[in-house]
Image: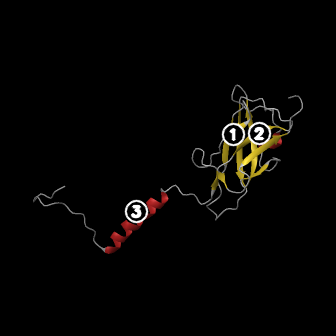
Amino acid sequence: MRKPDGKPLRLTFGSRRVSALVVVSIAVLQLGCSGSHPYDLVNVSGKVTYEDGSLIPAKSIMLKFNPEAAAIDTKTHPRKGFALVDVSDGTFEYATTHTHADGLVAGKHKVLIVAHGEDGKAVKIVPKEYLRPDTTPVEVDTENATFEIKVKKPTGV
């Protein structure tokens, strides 16, 4: 851009304080957008079946991982993760916490197992204790990144 007299337009700041503020603001924005997370993430995979080794007969199965890691401060808590199970063989190849297939927060997790039927609604082919973090008997640790999850088979299934 040019001024009316034809000279180039130059942006100037009234003080060094404003210049420093702009530089700091840009640096903070770049750090905020860098994609770093306060918790380490671990790639995981595994298999989920009934205790007898048979597949869970659902249209879809979602595993929800509730991390047991401590909060860093009052505003920074570990984020939950999830995995979608291939119901044809009971396996899952990855878990997602922030972005697709980025892994789970390092450490122990309580695992919730949610099965859905043909209509997309939850079905009762997994005992209800597996649906809540305070009652699920399944706990995994990312120290062993390949999980073998066994579920009690409800009567009548």
Secondary structure under tag 2 reads strand
Would you place residue 13 above or below residue 95 in this image?
A: below
Q: Residue 49 is drawn in which quadrant? A: top right
Residue name at image x 30 percent, y 73 percent: 15
**Amino acid type of the residue tagged 3 in the rendering:** Ile
Q: Which residue is mark 2?
A: 48
Secondary structure under tag 3 reads helix
Outermost residue, right side: 155
Confirm or deny contact between disc 3 and disc 2 (CB under 8 A). Answer: no
Q: Earlier in the sequence, mark 3 or mark 2?
A: 3
108 lies left or right of 94: right
Q: Nearer the viewer, residue 27 or 54?
A: 54
Q: Could you classify mark 2 by the number of other residues whose Cα lies within 10 Å: few (under 14), some (14-19), or many (20 or more)? A: many
- Image depth: mark 3 or mark 2 in front: 2
Q: Residue 157 is drawn in which quadrant? A: top right
Q: CA distance from mark 3 to mark 2?
A: 46 Å
